[in-house]
Image: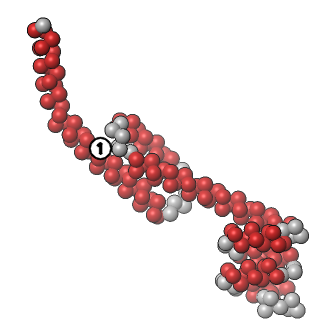
Amino acid sequence: IARDPLRHVELRKQAILTIDDQALLYSIAQDEKSRELQTLTANLIQDIDKLKALEKVHGKNNKQLRQLIKERLTVEENRQAMRRQIVACCEEVEALGKTGRWEQDKSQLLVLHQRWKQFSDIPAIYTQRFNAGEEDFQQRLAAYSDQAAHLQPLREGFENLLGQALHWQ
């Protein structure tokens, strides 16, 4: 029904709206003569590459289709940019505590938390990755703090001995 040009346009619209098969939607949009149905069908297509191919076929003659694809591409580019920022934030939290700059890394963790709060619709896998990186840093920081606390009396004793040695000369 969706492909039959002899059927009423409203009936064809309803038929198109019921289609889930992305390949079929693409095929209909590619072969369709009606600009309105091209745009309606393209709006249901999720694959960005297929939308770009439709723009090449019908973009010159269909301003609505061209605008729809432009908007979808912008949304997709923004989504990918956000995803890159989320991944970068995860990588930064995973790198904390590996350089031995503990005080700086504690401050950086606070900055990363603020940045993380600015993201919306974070996929669960990245939330888990961020949390695991933070937990790993906290464990390494606790181990470092314990080690530093155990070494502090030795360090103080060594400094006292150095001070006494300087007075004897």
Q: Residues within 10 Å of mark 1 (few under 14, many from 20)?
A: many
**Residue 107 picture location, percent across and down:** 41, 38
How far across and down, in percent of the image, does residue 103 sit? 35, 35
Which residue is at a point 21% across and 41% down the rendered structure image?
Answer: 146
Question: In which quadrant of the rendered view does residue 9 lie?
Answer: bottom right
Q: Against 34, is 154 above or below?
A: above
Q: Is residue 131 above or below residue 18?
A: above
For label 1, the residue is 141
Which x, y percent locates residue 91? 45, 51
**Side (left or right) of 1 relative to 118:** right
- Which residue ends up furthest to the front in the rendered image? 169
Drawn side of residue 144 relative to residue 14, left or right: left
**Residue sitting at 83 percent across and 85 percent down?**
10
Q: Quadrant of the N terminus?
A: bottom right
Q: Determine if residue 117 is in view.
A: no
Q: Position of residue 33 (x, y in %)?
A: 87, 80
Q: Residue at x 34, y 53 (%)?
A: 135
Q: Is residue 111 above or below residue 67?
A: above
Q: Note whether 121 is above or below 150 in the view shown.
A: below
Q: In the picture, residue 6 is in which quadrant?
A: bottom right
Is residue 91 or residue 113 the one in the foreground? 91
Q: Residue furthest top?
A: 169
Please report the residue visible at 70 percent of the width from the left and 59 percent of the height from the top: 74
Query: In the rendered structure, which amino acid carries the disc numbered 1?
Result: Leu
Q: Quadrant of the C terminus?
A: top left
Q: Secondary structure at mark 1?
A: helix
